[in-house]
C-alpha cells in the first residue's frame, strides 16, 4: 500500500475561481499535439548532459504515494479535490541523481520535457517538496490523454503550466538554464508559485488575471475539439463504422 497524504482544503489562492469540470488545457499551439500511441511510463533522466537512467514506473520499487491536491491554472481557474498517485520526485532524485552530481548549489534545477514538445523548469528546492509527484493515476484510474498520460509532473504549489503533461525526460542542471525567451518568457515565471501569484515575469499577477480570463472558454474549446478529433482518428475502423448511421437501401 502506498502512502496517502491529505489535508483540509485551503482557501482558494489569490485570484483563482473554482471550476467544476477539469478540461484539457494549455498553450494553443499544443492543442493538436499528443503523446505517442501506446506510450509507457518510462522516463529518461540526465544530469548536466550525461545520461543516468531510464526509470520505468510500472516496475520500479520506489514507494508510491497518493495525495489530494487542487490544480490551479494560471488563467485563474482551479479544479479541486484531485487524487494523484505516483512516486515522489524527491525519491527519484535520491535514487537516481543525488550520488551522481556535486552538492547542489542555489542555482540547481530541473528541466522537464513532454512528448508533445512542451518543456518547463523549476528550481531543485521546489521539486524536492514532499507533494511533488511523477503521477501515473488520477482518482484511482490510469491517467488518460486529457490529463497527461502516461506520466504527469504534479507540483501543486505551482501554476498548471509547471505541471507538465506526457512527461518523457528529466534533465538535472547544476546551473538551471533559461529555456524560454520573448513572449514565452513573459508568461513563464521561474517558480510560478500560486500562493505568491507569480503568474508571469515583470507584470504583476493581479494584472495578468484580467488579461487571461477572456481566453479561458476559447482555449478550453480548442483543446477539447482537438482531443475529440484525435480520439476519433485513433479509434479502430470497425468502431468508427459502428458509429455511422446505416444507409437506406
Image: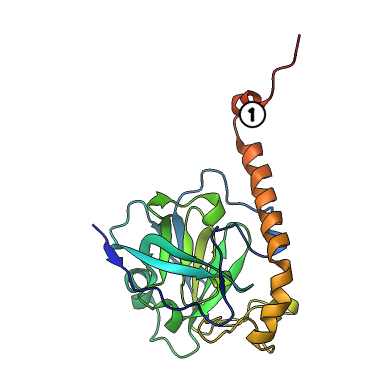
Residue 64 vs residue 10, the one in the foreground:
10
Q: Residue furthest top?
A: 249
Question: Is 67 on the left or on the right of 46, as rendered?
Answer: left
Label 1 environment density (alpha carbons within 10 Å; few <14, some 14–19, many ≥20) = few
Identify the residue at horizontal 73%, vertical 60% (top origin). Answer: 218
Identify the residue at horizontal 73%, vertical 70% (top origin). Answer: 214
Residue 49 vs residue 69, the one in the foreground:
69
Picture quadrant where residue 53 is located = bottom left
- x, y percentage for residue 52? 42, 67
Which image quarter is the N terminus in? bottom left
- x, y percentage for residue 201? 66, 86
* Residue 219 vertical position relative to residue 73 in the rendered view, above or below: above
Residue 53, can we see it?
no
Q: Residue furthest left?
A: 1
Which image quarter is the C terminus in? top right
Residue 145 vs residue 139, the one in the foreground:
139
Identify the residue at horizontal 64%, vertical 78% (top origin). Answer: 188
The residue singled out by tag 1 in the image is 240
Secondary structure state at the residue bearing disc 1:
helix
- x, y percentage for residue 97? 38, 73
Residue 199 vs residue 180, the one in the foreground:
199
- x, y percentage for residue 23? 59, 57
Amino acid at each position: 500500500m502506498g502512502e496517502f497524504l491529505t489535508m483540509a482544503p485551503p482557501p482558494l489562492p489569490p485570484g483563482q475561481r473554482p471550476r467544476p469540470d477539469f478540461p484539457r488545457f494549455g498553450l494553443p499551439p499544443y492543442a493538436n499535439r499528443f503523446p505517442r500511441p501506446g506510450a509507457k511510463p518510462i522516463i529518461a533522466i540526465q544530469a548536466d548532459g550525461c545520461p543516468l537512467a531510464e526509470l520505468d514506473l510500472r516496475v520500479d520499487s520506489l514507494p508510491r504515494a497518493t495525495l489530494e491536491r487542487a490544480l490551479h491554472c494560471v488563467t485563474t481557474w482551479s479544479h479541486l479535490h484531485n487524487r494523484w498517485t505516483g512516486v515522489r520526485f524527491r525519491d527519484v532524485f535520491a535514487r537516481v541523481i543525488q550520488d551522481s552530481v556535486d552538492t547542489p548549489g542555489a542555482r540547481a534545477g530541473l528541466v522537464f520535457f513532454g512528448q508533445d514538445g512542451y518543456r518547463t523548469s523549476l528550481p531543485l528546492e521546489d521539486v524536492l517538496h514532499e507533494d511533488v509527484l511523477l503521477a501515473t493515476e488520477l482518482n484511482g484510474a490510469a491517467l488518460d490523454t486529457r490529463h497527461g498520460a502516461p506520466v504527469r509532473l504534479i507540483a501543486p504549489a505551482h501554476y498548471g503550466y509547471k505541471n507538465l503533461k506526457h512527461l518523457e525526460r528529466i534533465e538535472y542542471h547544476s546551473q538551471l538554464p533559461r529555456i524560454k525567451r520573448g513572449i514565452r518568457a513573459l508568461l513563464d515565471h521561474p517558480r510560478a508559485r500560486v500562493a505568491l501569484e507569480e503568474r508571469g515575469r515583470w507584470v504583476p499577477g493581479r494584472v495578468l488575471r484580467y488579461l487571461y480570463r477572456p481566453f479561458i472558454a476559447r482555449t478550453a474549446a480548442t483543446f477539447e475539439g482537438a482531443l475529440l478529433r484525435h480520439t476519433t482518428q485513433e479509434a479502430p475502423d470497425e468502431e468508427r463504422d459502428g458509429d455511422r448511421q446505416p444507409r437506406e437501401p
